[in-house]
């Protein structure tokens, strides 16, 4: 019997210690170190006692003569999923998908397996959380019970690999979820850092040797990070995050890492009674039901990967009775909002130090690109002055600390999407160099003061319509 050795592993970051500690020195987490017992590595002995290994083979980059070439990618049958993966699943690749509980990860993968099974590919769905009968009930609810998808309920990785190796290797294997898997080489509870890492290594080795595309479903922590060691995210070929809000009916699949395709690409789905439905035009979805005449709203022409996306930015600026005014942000970086507020006050003549500021990206979408600075600033000034922005205008541009409005990338794609949705004008940075359609009118701004002056020229809202103050809270220079 192999000699057992005891280690103490942090369940948050995976750091290993030789004795228990109350605080992890790597991530500063308290009470996260757990004792784990595993078999000693068979290769830990002297070099003389190790069995001899055969020499590895090397292959030319252009491929071997007469080699049978297979399709490099397997389409999933779901267009939005193929967009995120870069055109389909690469044979032998491993994808890690994480998301909040109940967001729809299992539903999406069940629909993907059914779509691939229709093309005649062998597809296996292995659940470590549900019984086979429960998976069938979900398939019946989605109308997919007649699809030739192979189901299994198993948590032992060695048994899973042995079963998948029988017959023709499957084109796609779903492991739901990696936190429930365990391997015989590690004597610790499923879900621990050592078990997750060991199980992932075995499944990745199987995918690389057989050409099966493997999708690992991962749980997330309360901070939104995928549970388990971060080394798993480095081991896999692609990492995707399934995002959404329980209060909204749409879901977003966002690529975080992809060795075989673009990153920062998104796929938009809508949750319906029959599962997840693709949204081919997400801009129309995010702009549906907006109030055109309400002050404090601006339409931002953004980019998510290669996809142009128009969303509504909502801002509310209200007088505060607190010594430290509130700053609440949903869907955007709070630090970025603080920077925009400081620039507006220093270079735009806007007094916001005694006002509460609330910012929201309508629909629950999360925006990360700095091109939203101009739309956010326009919404803030509009809310403060009480002047509604033109309903047919879109905004995009980055604001510097000097107040200058800087050009952003992919301006032609943003303008094309705005023109397609019926917008008639765009407020953009000066010298954007888009070379776009000359029929689409644009207003080029050089400085943040130009934006403030343009909105203030429309005049503040009259007294008695919501603000209750005679004078505006901005400087009309």
Image: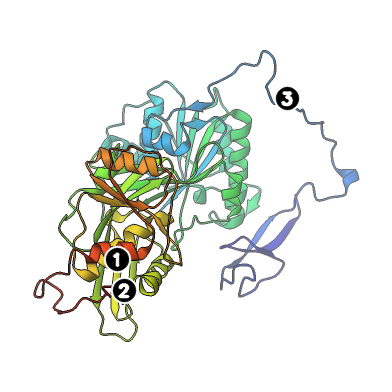
Residue 320 place in picture, x, y as percent? 26, 81
- Which element carries disc 3, helix, strand or loop? loop
For label 1, the residue is: 452
- Which label sits on residue 60? 3
Q: Residue at x 43, y 52 (%)?
A: 407
- Which element carries disc 1, helix, strand or loop? helix
The answer to whether any part of residue 188 appears in the image is no
State which mark lies toward you, 1 or 3: 1
The answer to whether any part of residue 431 appears in the image is yes
Residue 195 vs residue 297, the one in the foreground: 297
For label 2, the residue is: 350
Residue 327 vs residue 77, the one in the foreground: 327
Q: CA distance from mark 3 to mark 2?
A: 64 Å
- When the figure is inspected, residue 192 is found, relative to residue 307, above or below; the finding is below
- Which element carries disc 2, helix, strand or loop? loop
- Is residue 235 shown left or right of residue 136? right
- When the figure is inspected, residue 300 is found, relative to residue 380, above or below; the finding is above
- Is residue 63 shown left or right of residue 297? right
Q: Badge 2: few (under 14), some or many (20 or more) residues near its Cα, within 10 Å?
A: many
Residue 61 place in picture, x, y as percent? 70, 26
- Which label sits on residue 50? none
- Give the mark, 2 or 1, whose residue is nearer the N terminus: 2
- Give the mark, 1 or 3, whose residue is nearer the N terminus: 3
Q: Are marks 2 and 1 in contact (CB under 8 Å)?
A: yes
Q: Are marks 3 and 2 in contact (CB under 8 Å)?
A: no
- Is residue 445 shown left or right of residue 53? left
- Give the mark, 3 or 2, whose residue is nearer the N terminus: 3
């Amino acid at each position: 019997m192999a000699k057992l050795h005891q280690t103490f592993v942090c369940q948050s970051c995976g750091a290993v210690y030789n004795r228990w500690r109350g605080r992890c020195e790597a991530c500063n987490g308290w009470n996260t170190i757990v004792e784990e017992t595993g078999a000693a590595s068979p290769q830990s002995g002297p070099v003389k006692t190790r069995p001899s290994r055969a020499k590895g083979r090397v292959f030319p980059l252009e491929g071997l003569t007469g080699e049978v070439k297979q399709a490099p990618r397997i389409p999933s049958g779901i267009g939005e999923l193929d967009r995120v993966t870069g055109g389909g699943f690469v044979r032998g690749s491993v994808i890690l998908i994480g998301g909040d509980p109940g967001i729809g990860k299992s539903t999406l993968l069940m629909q993907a397996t059914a779509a691939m099974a229709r093309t005649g590919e062998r597809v296996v769905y292995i659940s470590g959380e549900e019984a086979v009968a429960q998976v069938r009930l979900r398939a019946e609810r989605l109308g997919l019970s007649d699809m030739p998808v192979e189901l299994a309920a198993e948590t032992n990785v060695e048994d899973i690999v042995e079963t998948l190796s029988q017959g023709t290797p499957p084109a796609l294997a779903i492991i739901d979820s990696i936190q429930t898997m365990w391997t015989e080489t590690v004597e610790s509870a499923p879900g621990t850092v050592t078990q997750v890492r060991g199980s992932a290594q075995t499944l990745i080795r199987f995918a690389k040797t057989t050409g099966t595309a493997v999708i690992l479903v991962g749980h997330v922590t309360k901070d939104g990070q995928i549970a388990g060691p971060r080394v798993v995210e480095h081991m896999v070929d692609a990492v995707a995050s399934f995002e959404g809000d329980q209060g909204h009916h749409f879901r977003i699949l966002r690529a975080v890492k992809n060795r075989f395709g673009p990153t920062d690409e998104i796929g938009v789905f809508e949750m319906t009674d029959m599962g997840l439905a693709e949204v081919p035009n997400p801009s129309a979805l995010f702009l549906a039901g907006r109030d055109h005449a309400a002050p404090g709203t601006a339409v931002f022409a953004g980019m998510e990967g290669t996809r142009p996306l128009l969303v509504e930015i909502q801002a509310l600026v209200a007088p505060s009775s607190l010594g430290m005014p509130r700053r609440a942000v949903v869907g955007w970086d709070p630090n970025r909002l603080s920077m925009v507020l400081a620039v507006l006050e220093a270079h735009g003549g806007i007094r916001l130090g005694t006002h509460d500021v609330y910012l929201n990206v309508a629909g629950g979408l999360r925006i990360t690109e700095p091109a939203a600075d101009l739309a956010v600033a326009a919404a803030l000034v509009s809310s403060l002055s009480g002047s509604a922005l033109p309903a047919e205008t879109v905004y995009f541009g980055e604001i510097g600390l000097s107040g200058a409005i800087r050009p952003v990338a992919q301006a032609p794609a943003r303008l094309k999407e705005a023109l397609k949705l019926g917008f008639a004008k765009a407020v953009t940075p000066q010298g954007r160099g888009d070379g776009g359609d000359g029929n689409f009118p644009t207003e080029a701004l050089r400085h943040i003061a130009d934006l403030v002056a343009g909105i203030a020229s429309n005049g503040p809202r009259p007294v008695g319509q919501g603000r209750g103050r005679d004078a505006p809270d901005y400087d009309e220079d």
